[in-house]
Amino acid sequence: MLKLEEETSVVEEPKPKKHRVLPLWYLLGWIVAALVAAAKIRLANPPIADDAYITLRYSYNLLHHGVFTYNYPNAHLTGAETSPLYGLLLAPLLRFFTPVQSFNIVMVISVASSAVLLFELIRREWGGVAGLLAALILLLNDYLYATRGMETSLFIFVCLAAILLLHSVAKDLITVHKKARLGKALAAGFILAIAVFIRGDAAILLLFPAAELVMGLGRNYRQAKNDERLRLQDPYAFIEPEPKLIRSTFETAGKPVKTFLSLLLGMLLVTAPMAVFLELETGRFIPGTLLAKEAQARSGFWGRGWLYYTNMADFIKTNPWHYEIYALAALAALGLIVVFASRSHWKNRPMTLSIIGFGLLQLIAYGNILIVPFYHWYMGPQILAVSALAAIAVAVAITKFRRAISAKLLAVPAIALFAYFTYFSVTLIGPTGIPWRQNSYMQAAAWLQANTPSNA
C-alpha cells in the first residue's frame, strides 16, 4: 500500500527590511539645519573676509554694467576671480538684497544642504547616530561661519553632492550584472564640473571614485578567474556553456563606455559655456589668482618656511572660537584611529575615505606644493573631514559601549570633548556692531577718498 506524504514547500525567510529615511524627514531636517545656521550667523556675528568684497565687485559690475570684471570699465585687465560660479550666483541676489544679506542667504542654504548630505553620507557607512552627529558638528562649527561672504559653504555642499554621486556611479560599474544608470553618471559629471568652477580644488575628488573603480574591477577579475579555474576542475564542465569573463564584471561590454561618456557629457554641459563666458569676459579661462598668491609668498610679508601652516595656526589661536577647533581636532584624531582600526573593510566605506583623503590632499597641495599664504576660507575640505571624524569617534563610543572594550575606553574622552565643543559653540556670542577688523578698512577708505582722484 502506497503511503501518501504531503509535499511541503520550503518557505523562504523574509528578508530584513532596510531602514530608509523618508523624504519628509530629510525636508524637516533641512529646515531645522537652516534655522540653526541662521541663528549662528545672527548670534555669532562672524567676520566677513575682505576678499568677499573682491568677488562682490565682479558680481556688481556684471549686474549693473554687464561686464564680469573687477575694475570697470577695464574689462579685460584681470582674471583674479577664482570662484566664477559663486560670483555669478551672487549677481541676481544683489538685485533684491544687500551684499551681506546675499552672503547670508547663500550660506544658510549651503550649510543646511551640506548638513543633510553629510548626514546621508555618514549614515550609509557608519549608521544614523554618526550621521546626525556629523551634521550637528558641521552646523555648530564657528570656523565655518567665519568664512561668511566667501564660497566655502557652497563649495562644501557641491563637493558632498559630487562625492555621493561619483561613488554611486563607481559602485554601479563594479557591481556584477547591475544595470548602468546613465542619468546618474550625467548628474555626477555635471555636479563635479560645478564644484570645479566654484573652486578648482574639487578636481581632487575624481581620484577617490577612480581608485574605488580600479580596485573593484581588479577584485571582480580575480574572482572571475577563480570561478573559471573551479569550472575547469569540474568533471561535468563540458555540459555548461563557456562563460565569458567580461560578463562577470559588467552586464555588457558597453556598460563602462556609456557611463564614462555620460560623465564627460555632464562635465561638458558646465565646462563649455563657462569656458566661453570666462574667455569673453575676463580674457582668460584659468584665473590668474594663483600667480598673485605665489607672488605674495615670494614677497616674504606673510613669513617664510612653513608659511601656510604657521599662518593657519596664528589665525586659529587669535580667534575667540579656537577652543572649539582644538576640541574638534582631538576628536578627529580619535575618529581617525577608529576608522583605521575598524574591523569592517575599508572598501565598505569609500565615501568616508574620500572625505578624509580630500581634506589631506588639499592641505598638502596648499601647504607643501604651492606654499602660499593661508586664508581661512581655503579650509572647506578640512572642515568636512574633521566633522566626519569627530562624529564617528563619538558615535562608536556611544553605540558600541556595551559590546566593545575599546568603545568603553573611547567613551569618556570622546563624549567629554564633544560636550566641550558643543557648550562653547552654543554659548559663544559674537560682538555686535562693526564686524571684525572693519575699522581699519573704514580708515583706509576715508584716506583714499580724501587723497586720491574721484575717478581713480
Image (cartoon, rainbow, N blue to C red):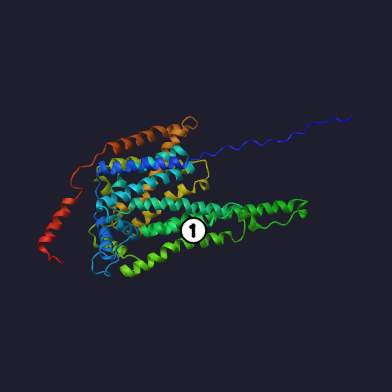
256 relative position to 62: left or right? right
Identify which residue, 249 or 42, lies in the foreground. 42
* Quarter where residue 27 is shown: top left
> Residue at 55% across / 53% down in the picture?
172
Number of numbered discs overlaid on the protein picture = 1
Identify which residue, 375 or 250, lies in the foreground. 250
> Residue at 30% across / 46% down in the picture?
145
Identify which residue, 21 or 204, lies in the foreground. 21
Q: Furthest-right residue in view? A: 1
The quarter of the picture where the C terminus appears is: bottom left
Q: Is residue 332 visible?
A: no
- At label 1, the amino acid type is Leu
The quarter of the picture where the N terminus appears is: top right
Return the x and y of residue 159 as percentages of the image width and height. 41, 53
How packed is label 1: few (under 14 Cα within 10 Å), some, or many (20 or more)? many
Return the x and y of residue 232 as percentages of the image width and height. 73, 54
Q: Which residue lies under the disc numbered 1?
A: 186
* Quarter where residue 378 is shown: bottom left
Return the x and y of residue 447 as percentages of the image width and height. 11, 59
Instruction: For mark 1, give the secondary structure.
Output: helix
Q: Is residue 47 above or below residue 270?
A: above
